[in-house]
Image (cartoon, grey):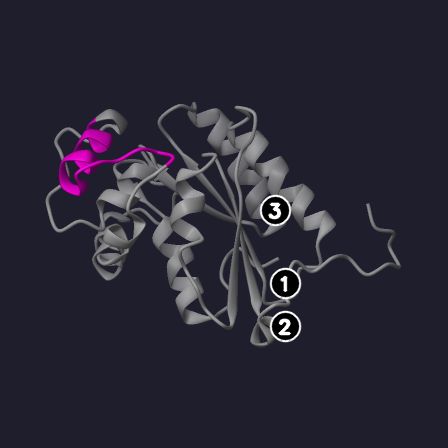
Amino acid sequence: MPGLTSRKKRPLDRTVETLRDARLIIIATEGSLTEKIYFESFRFTNVQVRVIPSENGKSSPQHVLENAKVYKETFDLGDGDELWLVIDVDRWPAATLSEVAAVTTAKKIGLAVSNPSFELWLALHLDVELPEPVSNEGLITHLRSQLGSYNKHKYDCGAILNGLDRAIERASGLDTSPQHRWPQSVGSRCYKIIQSIRAGRIGPGSA
């Protein structure tokens, strides 16, 4: 771990000169690959997106939070950089989510929760109605039907990103209780990360 007087590592891609002063969006995720495939599809000259996936089956919200905290302590995050957690509702009790949400609020880490799962966020990109009732299993079946195939470790992100504006609009429309720290019913706050990436502003996950 770097000392207090040492310069922390800044994980910039020096192969692209214009990225030298790029703003960083760091996203710690519950999944090991699904979210990484999606978020690292974004390419901008003034913003770098880095995904910290879960590893070795350690995907609880507490583990995701710990991954984010370690990254923040290790790398040199500036005033315009942001750190986010991307987690799901479906497998975790409200007490666990509440505990993590309290820490993210205190530490100024962005929290983008999907209810029931990240697959909802992906499904919102598609120009079709969501399956009823909405469940993680139903969403996976829905994505396979609409995309021709879908696997958490391999899917056609390009086809999904064609509906990015649609996904933002639909997700923000579902977000009817912003006073809650995560969607209490079907919804996804992942749209907030995309809005921040696009706007180049300092969002709720400012480091």
Q: Secondary structure at mark 3?
A: helix
Q: Residues within 10 Å of mark 1 (few under 14, many from 20)?
A: some
The quarter of the picture where residue 146 lies is top left
- List the single residue furthest toward the front: 15
The quadrant the C terminus occupies is bottom right
Which mark is nearer the camera, 1 or 3?
Answer: 1
Disc assigned to residue 12: 1
Residue located beneath label 3 in the image: 106
Q: Residues within 10 Å of mark 3 (few under 14, many from 20)?
A: few
User: Does residue 26 appear in this view?
Assistant: yes
CA distance separating discs 1 and 2: 7 Å
Under mark 2, the amino acid is Arg
Position of residue 110 measured from the top left corner of the image (x, y, whole percent): 51, 50
Under mark 1, the amino acid is Leu
Q: Secondary structure at mark 1?
A: loop
Residue 143 in the magenta stretch? The answer is yes
The quarter of the picture where residue 79 lies is bottom right
Residue located beneath label 2 in the image: 20
- List the single residue furthest toward the bottom: 18
Question: The magenta stretch spans which residues?
Answer: 138-153
Under mark 3, the amino acid is Ala
CA distance separating discs 3 and 2: 30 Å
Q: Residues within 10 Å of mark 2 (few under 14, many from 20)?
A: some
Q: Earlier in the sequence, mark 3 or mark 2?
A: 2
Position of residue 155 in the picture relative to residue 124 (left or right): right
Camera-nearest residue between 62 and 153? 153
Residue 57 in the magenta stretch? The answer is no
Whether tag 1 and tag 2 are in contact, CB under 8 A, the answer is yes
Disc assigned to residue 110: none
Q: Earlier in the sequence, mark 1 or mark 2?
A: 1
The image shows residue 24, relative to residue 160, as above or below, that is: below
